[in-house]
Amino acid sequence: MANKTIVDFEAIKNNLSNVSKPIQVLNENAEITNQEIFDTFSDDDLVEFMKKMVWERALHEQTMNFSRQGRMGFYAPTEGEEASEMGTVLAMKKQDYLLPAYRDVPQLIQHGATVTEAYLWSRGHVVGNKFKARSMMPQIIIGAAYVEAAGVGLGIKKNKEEDTIAFTYTGDGGTSQGDSYEGMNFAGAYQAPVLFIVQNNGFAISTPRVKQTAAPTLAQKAVAAGIPSVQVDGMDILACYAVAKAARDYMVAGNGPVMIETLTYRFGAHSSAGDDPKRYRTKDQEQPWFEKDPLIRLRKILTDKGLWSEEQEDKLTDEYKASFKDAIKEADSVPADTVSDMLKRTFEIPTPEMKKEIDKFEAKESK
């Protein structure tokens, strides 16, 4: 028998890397790479994008200070991801459903929650879940928001809600979880209007993206679920906004789900719990990403156009941080949650055993 193969698997494997370059409008040198799309933004648009990124950077810095003071619960830093987060959430509408993960508190606030509510959520207080935004509370389980989003998206479709989608986030590590594929597969099968956003920030806690998967891109993981996907420069807020808006327009026209992978970077630790990035990445690895800082590139464009100044940015930063200090004071004034209240909320009608527990804790709490 001749030694002839019916299929060239190596050729197929090599072709997996034959993917388009990430979509970009403004590169790390603040050079316009897509003039046609850049021209769709007015000067006011550009300034507003900058204000939102300065707001998120200030939120990160001030919240980290609160965390060091012991005034926060769990907090996931977002420094470096401002373009990815603000660019995508600003392309959504208030009637859209947000299914956030724990690093998506800035998007939750922009979508309608207050900073005080976000701080209370961080502390595990029930009031932190009572925001008016059309959103679930931030999901702690990695990848689980994708499953929730698929269900919400199907509900949107069955209820025939017009001009409405569900949008959700996970990190690069989240794509290694079964929940992520299951959520995408469900949405793809039912053609539910769900925007799946992967914020590829390079590390799942300490595990680098290259050790998580052999897939050349995370975006192409959606292909198995029949979902169109794309990579975007996640340090370019103009590209993130333009692609997210295009995805939303595509979905509300009845075309099913989309997945976007934003190539971004978290400058600091995974969480305020104290992991040390110096233990799993080097300065040489970090420096190129610091040079891609999304605030730097848009700041240069605005400064060159005479629309921005250092004094203006410093003033805004001070104002934002002052508002966050007011928010933490407001959170401090909310009465502490009690164990008995938590137990009362567990079931509409407490079981006999739980009723005993409620009575026991109420007696302790009244002393």
Image: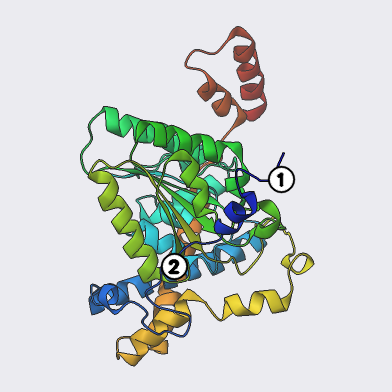
- For image coordinates 31% across by 72% down, the residue present is 48
Q: Earlier in the sequence, mark 1 or mark 2?
A: 1
Q: Is residue 161 above or below residue 362?
A: below
Percent of width and height locating residue 266: 59, 65
- For image coordinates 60% across by 64% down, the residue present is 64
Left or right: 34, with 334 as reference point: left
Quick one: quadrant of the C terminus? Answer: top right
Percent of width and height locating residue 350: 54, 13
What amino acid type should be assigned to the residue bearing mark 1?
Asn
At label 2, counting other C-alpha atoms closer than 10 Å, the crowd grade (few under 14, some 14-19, many 20 or more) is many
Q: Is residue 364 above or below residue 178?
A: above
Mark 2: which secondary structure? helix
Cα gap from disc 1 to disc 2, whole angstroms:
53 Å
Residue closest to the far front: 1
Left or right: 175, with 278 as reference point: left
- Residue linked to disc 1: 3
Q: Return the residue nearer the eye: 20 or 200.
A: 20
At label 1, counting other C-alpha atoms closer than 10 Å, the crowd grade (few under 14, some 14-19, many 20 or more) is few
